[in-house]
Each structure stands twice: as C-alpha cells, then as structure tokens.
Image: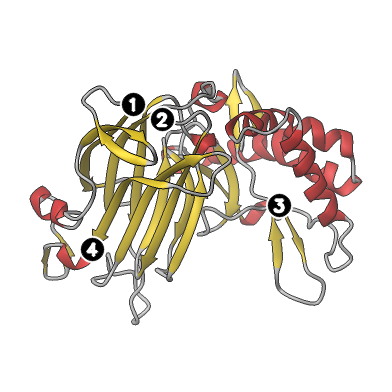
C-alpha cells in the first residue's frame, strides 16, 4: 500500500546550527543564530511527482566573541522526511539526515571543503540509498518501488558553508506547481546597483503596493483576487475543498485588520528592504536587511515592539508578477 493522499512533512531538530532548509530550491526556513529548534513543516506545496531535492544550506554563525567564525563545532541537525495518509496522524520516516559538526575535519579552525570523505563523515548516520514501497505503514524494500532515497552530495555551497543535498523520488497526486514554470530571476549579488534598484521598484509597484492597499482598505474582493492563484494550488496540495484556502487566508487577514490589539498594517519601509530570490531562481520576496525569511508586510502590536508578519512569495510569468506562496 502506498498513499492515496500523501501528506509529506519535514521534521527538523537542531542545536548550535545555522541553516536554510530548501525543498526543490524553495526556502522554507532559516536560522542565523543557532538556537534550539524542533519544528515540523508541511511541504506538499513545494513537491512534484518524481525527483525532488532537499537541501540543507548551512550558515556560519557567531560564537561568543560575536564574530562569524564558521560552522559551530558543536552543531547538530536532524532532518526527517515523513509521510502519512492525509486523514491519519500516524506518519513514517522515509529518510533522515543526521548532521554532526564535531565530525568536520578542520585546519586551524577552518573546514576543509575539498575533503569530500571528511564531509560525508558528518552525515554517516543518515539514511542510505534505497528504493522501496510503503506497506501497512512500514518500509518494504522493492527495486521497482515508488519511493527512492538517493545518494548524498556534500560541498561548499551557495551560502559559502556546507551544503548537504539529497534527491528523493516521491509519488504525488497533484499537478506540477505553477512556480516551476515561472521566469528565471536574478539574485541580488548578480545585479548591478541600477538593476537592483529597478527590480525593487518594480516589485513595490506591481506586487507589494496592491497587497498593502487592499489591507489598508479592508477590501475583501481585492484580497481574494490577489491570493486566489496561491489558494487554488494549496487547496490541491492539502486536499481541501475548492476555494477553502483563499477563504481561510482572507479571513485571517481580516482578523488582523480588525484586531484591536494591532495597529493598521504598517507602511512598508522600502528603503530598508532587500530583494531575495529562492535557490531555484523561481520565487522572490522583499525582506528586512539581514533577515532573509522576514517580510516587509506586518501589523504592529500597540504599545509593544512585536509584529505579526505576512510572509508572501511571488513568481513572474512573462513579465507579470503573481503571489504563489
């Protein structure tokens, strides 16, 4: 038995470890400090039927001296790919990546990234390559099974630190998500200053201003239209009724608008915003400087320096921007 409505998640457990976790190049979370973390992320809306990549992009984090001096020597991370039937609470682990920074080979404190054998030793307790089916919620080895866990690749990656990549073959019943076919975008570091200013200006005018204005005007119809494409795909990803996700999203946003403990949506401080692009170069968003996964759309609590953020990501199709996640 494989799954009629598979619900895939990533379970993350970390300590003293900075990271960005990505599925098919879509960043789902980051930690720049190395705090303790124990979180589970639904990922159906980032997956496709067939081969998928799961990446751990490590981040150099500060030690007690306050300087960013590399990967923490006591860093530990476990990332488990799990699946369950949508209407069940019982999940099984398909693959588990176990990273132990103490195993890194270093030269005068610096990681030796050319030593691939040494890098692989940091994940030696991880799930090895295999192909299988799931029968009665148990792994059943099968050379023609629907699930495949691939070999790991390790290297100095895009974050200038260790990158751990694994390809997994997964069966999914939903269509290819629209963002996979979006225009390719250019990351900040590959843009000239003029190109970066122009890109940010275009995103403000075409993307953020309509969302900000709809929130400010408490415009249900405008919010529904802006989030309808995203909502349609999330309905499919998580087996909801047509229209349920956009209804829930708009209800949530209107709850923020009418929350007496919150001020009105804050005017976006674009001079303090940077353009982020996903690792697959398909999605983009504006964020506060040095906080890649933050959002420039938020409501502030009255009398407190606490905000409720509205994270949204966009893709561009034939030059036109759309909310996709």
First of labels 3, 2 by sequence position: 2
Residue 15 versus residue 98 in the image, above or below: below
Give residue 100's mark.
Answer: 4
Task: Report the mark closest to the observer, 1 or 2.
Answer: 2
For the C terminus, the quadrant is top right
Quarter of image, res 101: bottom left
Tell which residue pokes out farthest to the bottom in this image.
64
Query: Residue 311's x, y, as percent?
Result: 64, 49
Circle 4/circle 2 CB separation < 8 Å: no
Circle 1/circle 2 CB separation < 8 Å: yes
- Is 186 on the left or on the right of 14, as rendered? right
Quarter of image, res 234: top right
First of labels 4, 3 by sequence position: 4
Give residue 146's mark.
Answer: 1
Give residue 297's mark.
Answer: 3
Frontmost residue, 88 versus 230:
88
Circle 3/circle 2 CB separation < 8 Å: no
As helix, strand or loop, the secondary structure at mark 1 comes to loop
Mark 2, residues whose alpha carbon is within 10 Å: few (<14), some, or many (≥20)? some
Looking at the image, which residue is at 23% across and 47% down? 127
As helix, strand or loop, the secondary structure at mark 4 comes to strand
Mark 4, residues whose alpha carbon is within 10 Å: few (<14), some, or many (≥20)? some
Q: CA distance from mark 4 to mark 2?
A: 32 Å
């Amino acid at each position: 038995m494989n799954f009629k409505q598979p619900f895939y998640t990533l379970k993350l457990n970390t300590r003293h470890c900075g990271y960005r976790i990505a599925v098919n190049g879509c960043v789902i979370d980051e930690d720049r400090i190395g705090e303790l973390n124990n979180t589970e992320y639904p990922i159906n809306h980032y997956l496709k039927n067939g081969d998928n990549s799961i990446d751990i992009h490590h981040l150099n984090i500060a030690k007690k001296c306050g300087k960013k001096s590399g990967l923490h020597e006591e860093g530990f991370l476990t990332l488990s790919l799990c699946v369950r039937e949508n209407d069940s609470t019982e999940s099984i682990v398909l693959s588990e990546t176990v990273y132990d920074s103490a195993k890194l080979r270093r030269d005068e404190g610096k990681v030796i990234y050319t030593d691939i054998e040494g890098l692989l030793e940091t994940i030696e307790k991880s799930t090895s390559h295999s192909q299988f089916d799931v029968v009665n919620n148990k792994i059943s080895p099968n050379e023609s099974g629907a699930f495949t866990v691939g070999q790991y690749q390790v290297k100095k990656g895009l974050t200038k630190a260790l990158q751990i990549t694994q390809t997994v073959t997964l069966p999914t019943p939903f269509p290819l998500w629209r963002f996979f076919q979006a225009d390719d975008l250019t990351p900040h570091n590959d843009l000239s200053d003029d190109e970066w200013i122009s890109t940010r200006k275009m995103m403000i005018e075409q993307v953020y201003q309509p969302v900000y204005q709809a929130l400010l005007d408490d415009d249900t119809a405008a919010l529904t239209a802006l989030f309808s494409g995203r909502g349609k795909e999330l309905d499919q990803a998580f087996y909801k009724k047509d229209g349920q996700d956009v209804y829930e999203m708009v209800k949530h946003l209107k709850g923020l608008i009418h929350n007496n403990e919150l001020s009105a949506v804050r005017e976006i401080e674009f001079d303090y915003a940077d353009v982020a692009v996903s690792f697959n170069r398909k999605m983009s968003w504006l964020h506060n400087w040095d906080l890649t996964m933050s959002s420039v759309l938020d409501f502030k609590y009255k009398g407190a320096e606490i905000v409720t953020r509205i994270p949204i990501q966009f893709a561009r199709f034939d030059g036109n921007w759309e909310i996709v996640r």
